[in-house]
Image (spheres, rainbow, N blue to C red):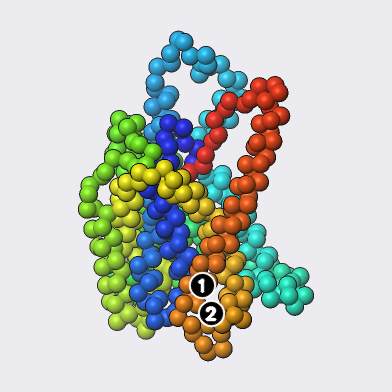
Amino acid sequence: MAEAASHPRHAGIELGRAVAMLAVVLIHVPPPPAWNALLRPLAEFGVPYFFVVSGFLWARGHLARQSARLAPVSPASPVSPGSAAPSTRAWSAWRAALGPLPRLLGLYALGFVAYSLLPLDWLTALLHRRLLASVAATAQATLTALARAPLGTLFDGPPGGFHLWFLASLALGLGTVMLGVRLRRARLLGGTAVALFVFGLLAGRYAATPLGIPLGWSVRNGPFQAVLLVGVGALLAQRMSAQELAREPANGGPRVRRGWGPLGLALGWLIAFAERHALGAIEAQPGEPDVYSLAVLPLGLGAFFCFHDLRITSPRVQRGATWLGGTTLGVYLWHVLLRVPLASVLAVLGLYPARGTNPTWGFAALFALSVLCVLLWRTGLRLCAHGRRRWSGRGAGRGGLDQRPPIELEGV
C-alpha cells in the first residue's frame, strides 16, 4: 500500500514475508511423500502470515494518513493542503481510498492471463516445437473451466494457476475490511468475519464430520478466511497507539508480548497435526490439504509476533531483509511457471525424481532454483528501473529535480 515516508519498512516483518514465501514455495514444490507429512504442516504459517501482515500494514498507513490530516499546518510551511489542484486532490483521495486493491487486482489479472495461455511444461513444448499447440490446449482448458464453473474459476484461478486464489482472496479480504472501516461498522465487520470463517471451516476442512456442511465446491478461496485474518492484522495496528508507531525505529517496533509468537506457532502446529490425525481417522484420506483449518489463526498471529518482535540492528541486514520482502509477490506469481521446466532439467541431471528414482534432495534443488530464478529476474528489472530513474534525473536536473518522494506499495 502507499505508505507515508514517516513509517519506514519494518525489517523484521519484511524478513518474515521472505521466510513465509519460502514456506509457500516449499508446499508447491513439493517435498518427497515421506517428508511432506512433516514439512507441510510446518510450512502452513505462510499464507495466514501474509493475510495478517497485509491487514496490519494497510491499517498502519490508514492511521498515519488520518493523523496527517488532523495535524495542524505550520504557517511557515511552503505548501498548504489546499494549494493542490482539485483534480490532484481527488486523485489522491481515490488512491488512498482504494489502497493496494488496484495493484492486487492488476497482478491477479496478469497472472490469470499468463497461466491461461502458457502450459506449465512450456520448456518441453518449446523444445519439441509445439508451443503454439500447447498454448491453444491450455487456453481451451481455461475456457472449459470458465464455462463449467465461472465464479469458482475466477476465485481459484485457471487450471495451471492454482495458486492465484490467494491474490483474489486477499483483494476480497482487504476490500471488505476497508469498507467496514470506512463505514465505521466495526462490530458488524467482526461478526461477519467470524461467521465467514466458521462457515468455511464447516464446509471445508470439517465437511466430513457430523457438524460439516458439504457443499461440493472449495471454500479455501473467497472471503472465508481472508476477512478474519486481514481484520485481525488491522486490529493489531489499531491497538498500537500513534505514539508507539511514531517512536518505532526502522529496524523493529514496540514488542507486543514476549513469548506470544512462539506460543502461537506451537499452538497452531499442534492443532494442525491433531486435525490431520483426527480427520485421517474419519475420512479415507486426510483432510483436503488446500482447505484452511482452525490452525491458521494461531499460526498467522504467532508468526506475526515472532517477526514483529525481531530486532535487526545491522543496517546491511535491514536492507537485505527489506529487499527480500519486496520480492515476495514476484516469487509467488511466477514460481509455479518455473516448477515443471526446472524439474525436467534436474531430472536429466539426476537430481530430481524420474523413472522411479527419488533423490532425497531433489525437491531442495528444485526449490532453490525456482526462488533463485525469480530473484535474478527481479534484480534485473530493478537494475533497469534504477538506470531509467538515473537517466530521468539527469534530464530533470537541467530544469530542477523532482522533489516528490517515491511512493512504495506495501501490505501484499
Counting residues from the N terminus, which is met first, the one under dot 2 or under dot 1?
2
Q: What residue type is labelled 1?
A: Ala
* Mark number, residue 280: none
| Residue at the spot of label 2 | 352
Tell me the crowding category of disc 1: few under 14, some 14 to 19, or many 20 or more residues within 10 angstroms, Cα based.
Answer: some
Total labels: the figure holds 2
Query: CB under 8 Å between callouts 2 and 1?
Result: yes
Q: Is label 1 in a helix, a strand or a loop? A: helix
Find residue 171 and report its horizontal and vertical position in percent.
49, 50
Q: Which of 214 and 28 is in front in this view?
A: 28
Instruction: Name the residue: 67% across, 25% down.
Output: 397
Q: Which of 47 and 344 is in front in this view?
A: 344
Find residue 301 and report its horizontal and vertical position in percent.
31, 53
Among the 4 quarters of the image, the one containing residue 343: bottom right
| Residue at the spot of label 1 | 365
Q: Is label 2 in a helix, a strand or a loop? A: loop
Tell me the crowding category of disc 2: few under 14, some 14 to 19, or many 20 or more residues within 10 angstroms, Cα based.
Answer: many
Instruction: Name the residue: 41% across, 73% down.
Output: 288
Find residue 179 and report its horizontal and vertical position in percent.
44, 41
Among the 4 quarters of the image, the one containing residue 67: top left
The answer to whether residue 156 is seen in the rendering is no
Q: What residue type is labelled 2?
A: Tyr
The answer to whether residue 43 is seen in the rendering is yes
Instruction: Name the residue: 22% across, 49% down.
Output: 258
Q: In this view, does 110 lie to the left or right of 368?
A: right
- Residue that extends furthest to the top in the rendered view of this protein: 75
